[in-house]
Image: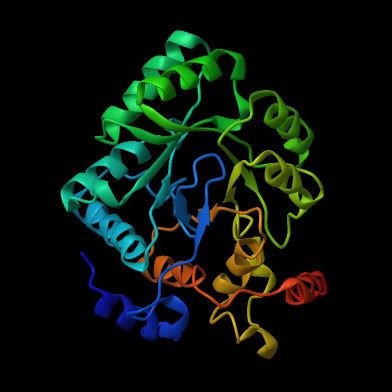
Amino acid sequence: MITRRQFIEASAALGISTRIVGAANDRMLMRRIPGSGESLPVIGLGTWQVFDVEGTAQELADRRQIVEALFEAGGSVIDTSPMYRRSERVVGEVLTSGGHHEHAFLATKVWTDGDAAGRRQMRRSAELMQTERIDLMQVHNRRDMESHWPTIDEYQQNGFIRYSGITDYRDSADDAMMTLMRRYNPDFIQINYSLLERGAERGVLPLARELGIAVLINRPFVSGRLFRAVRGREIPGWAEEFAASWGQFFLKFIVSHAAVTCVIPATSKLRHMVDNAGAGFDPLPDSVTRQRMVDYIETL
């Protein structure tokens, strides 16, 4: 496993302050899951595309380094899906080869139609990830909720699944998501939210706080659009108090929203995982600074 010294050295190589990414006495910020009181670290890891690899020794070693960097920084959430092809298998192999299952909060999804197919897929996900229990099972993009929700509830009762969830990745789905939140009262939702996609502020995020639902955030960089928007620019001087890179700037905007539980940026590069993890440490921007961040991005 990557040592704290190696983690800090990697951070220094990126020009990231160890105060921000976690000096010896610091811990990543935690947020409570409203339904249980359990706390999760605010920065996790997404696996869309980046863990969908053949699984050669080098590919697995590279991804094991990424996962270990997440854990070393204090993170735990790894989000995947059967839709992501080989990602669940790669996650399982990486965790097992490193002996790291105990460090991980495993979130995956059901993405099929019908009760029987859903049950098979959920069980297969556990086999691929080499775990006897799944921390969070989410209905992927709200697909066939009526078939899968009773199964998830049953599996929660028998302990195979710990938490329930619903996902989507589009602002256009916000109204439908709010309807499902009221109807099913999931433990989690997973939605898109960023400096370029702030639609969730109008309804979904306030409703999550009202109903006591934890929130995972996908698409924090909007498929790279945010990085393209600032290409060739340095982060503004007023942001250097809380962010050491554009990646941290973007992630800290999200983490500083009180309704957000955890952000799950995907990456296949160790240096990006180290940088992303740095966004999980104090300080965070206050409400005035958050608006300044919005105004800045809107001028680009």
On the picture, is 292 further left or further right than 238? right
Classify 241 as above or below 121.
below
Classify 30 as above or below 24.
above
Q: Residue at x 23, y 72 (%)?
A: 3
Q: Residue at x 40, y 76 (%)?
A: 26
What is the quadrant of the C terminus in the image?
A: bottom right
Identify the image quadrant of residue 258: bottom right
Is residue 16 among what the camera can see? no
Q: Nearer the viewer, residue 89 or 98?
A: 98
Name the residue furthest bottom. 237
Q: Nearer the viewer, residue 34 or 126?
A: 34
Q: Residue at x 81, y 69 (%)?
A: 298
Identify the image quadrant of residue 185: top right
Query: Residue 80 at x, y = what percent?
Result: 43, 41
Query: Residue 10 at x, y = what percent?
Result: 33, 79
Classify 199 as above or below 287.
above
Query: Residue 99 at x, y = what percent?
Result: 18, 50
What is the quadrant of the N terminus in the image?
A: bottom left
Q: Residue at x 28, y 61 (%)?
A: 68
On the picture, is 263 further left or further right than 185? left
On the picture, is 135 further left or further right than 30? left
Query: Residue 289 at x, y = what percent?
Result: 74, 77
In the rendered picture of this protein, how many numbered marks are placed on residues?
Answer: 0
Is residue 226 among what the camera can see? yes
Q: How is the image coloured?
A: rainbow
